[in-house]
Image (tube, helix red, strand yellow):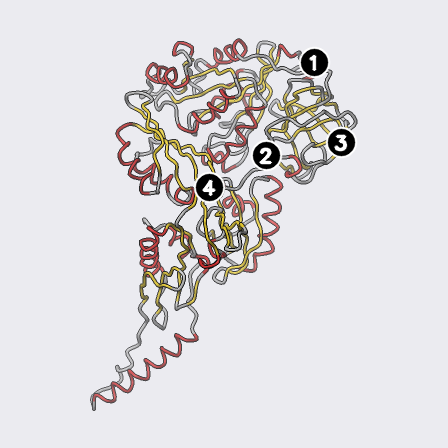
Amino acid sequence: MPSASASALDKIRNIAIIAHIDHGKSTLADRMLEICGAVEARDMRAQYLDSMDIERERGITIKLQSVALNYRGFQINLIDTPGHVDFGYEVSRSLAACEGVVLVVDASQGIEAQTLANMYLALDNNMEVVAALNKIDLPAADPDKYAQEIENILAIPAEDVLRISAKTGEGVPELLDAVIDRIPQPEGDPTAPLQALIFDSHFDTYRGVVSSVRIMNGSLKHGTKVKFMQAGGVHEADEIGVRTPDNKPVKELATGEVGYLIAGIKDVREARSGETITDANRPAAGALPGYREPQPMVFAGLYPVDGDDYEDFRDALDKLQLDDGSFSFEPETSTALGFGFRCGFLGLLHMEIVRERLEREFDLNLIATSPSVEYRITMVNGDEVVVDNPSVLPASGDWTKIEEPYMKASIITPTAYTGTLMELCQSKRGQMQRMEYLSPERMELVYHLPLAEVVIDFFDQMKSRSQGYASLDYEPIGYERGDLVRVDILFNSEQVDAFATIVHRDKSYDYGRRTAEKLREIIPRQQFEVPIQAAIGGRIIARETVRAYRKDVTAKLYGGDVTRKNKLLKKQKEGKKKMKSIGRVEIPPDTFIRALRLDD
């Protein structure tokens, strides 16, 4: 492959792939690698660009990847993006590095909500779109029907939608031809001061942070002193190069090209997605638009099952944050769980991925508390406080207003499931905004929903009610005032902070009752009776009792007056009363996980 610096602008095409989970995005990338000869046949494996074990097992892309392909004398810089809504920010950054996108839609399922959201991002940026229907080799495929649906929704003519099979390779060369013919060449001024966009970064144990960059203006040369305009750091470009897909060092990356930069940085947070790089000696006038800090949406406590693992857990979080700068953590203490950390995540899938990586890569056994969101509290004196942990919510008399985050949720579903999904949204305090038919068989529902109602089990229930056919996309839309209360759970009259939850007042009694009933089944019996209570402030709203083990103290009696039996029972009763006053309820570690699944 020729040196990247030798390529002219008209011989470069920068594209991203947009597709829903499991619509064949990574498989299409594999076929492109094969057709362009980027990977030797003996080295080829499925999902080649998905490097993490979790990605390969789950069949999803978590971290975006880039690769430079040589086809018909053109350099095609391909960016394989995540499809899940939690990683939408990575998608937006990868789109900023491209002039066009390849839209991949399953020919047996049609366009999905998250794909549609990413497509609107691309269209807002005036990007050229090459649409393709994948999996045409499947018996259930109906490419004509879904090509017409794409035309109805996105105004892309049905005859321009390509038919491909990423699995067999059918139609993929025609797709590459369409990319060259339809996607415009990059724009930029080669003589201007350097402006390069970082659209991804990951941490390498031996070399530090490796950043994926797109050169917007100027050129980046080996050994240049570069300045990171948002973080303010100045570093030397130790190595620059292109991925083919193995890292291939070059002396220069020119305007319009995509490659990687290694500058001896030890923390991914210094080189986050959206950061602008410029020449420290000849800086650009301003940073590229669009940079923002990743905003955590979901918060949960993570605790080691074994308290002795706390130090190892803290080191593991520090190391993982080097590779994934989009989650945050700070120490917290729980009376029930001991020492742990309050962590912020982009969404529920992100939380699951981070927890799984911590357990796998660092050999930890962790407990996660119930997911929560960030609430805004207006105190009596007018101060505004942000609370992401229900157990630290001030007493109701100390504040005048509580606001919760809302989101706009778009659900695309077959029309047969419309009623049951509308019922689900309304049960989650949703307000319908729009209902629109995309085709006679499929429709889009748009609701405004409280984020707190979505983070627990909304996605699972949506998939269950629609037999897996509905898809969800959401975006934050701000805060609204709510009639919210904190429900506390008490064991033996002692509050357990890990079970504290903020819920809407109308649902608080039902939530308290169901939680108490569930815990009664889970908590093992003790030598004394254990009352489980749900409370709002000082008012008990539900109670269940775990019966005590009882030894038959009258078994040794073989007759005599009944007063002998009553005397022994009275003595046992006093002993249990004393034990209850000094005894401590032992709560098994898996109780917290099982109690969250109230619908089991």
User: The disc labelled 1 sits on which kind of residue?
Assistant: Ala
Judge depth for marks 1 and 2 and give the one in front.
2
Residue 25 horizontal/vertical position (percent): 47, 24
User: The disc labelled 4 sits on which kind of residue?
Assistant: Tyr
Classify mark 1: helix, strand or loop. Answer: helix
Res 493 → quadrant = bottom left
- Determine contact: label 4, label 2, CB under 8 Å: no
Q: Residues within 10 Å of mark 2 (few under 14, many from 20)?
A: few
First in sequence, mark 4 or 2: give its number.
2
In this figure, which residue is indicated by the disc labeled 1? 6
User: The disc labelled 3 sits on which kind of residue?
Assistant: Glu
Classify mark 2: helix, strand or loop. Answer: loop
Structural distance between the alpha carbons of marks 1 and 4: 51 Å
Classify mark 4: helix, strand or loop. Answer: strand
First in sequence, mark 2 or 3: give its number.
3
| In-front residue for pair 71/128 | 128
In this figure, which residue is indicated by the disc labeled 2? 292
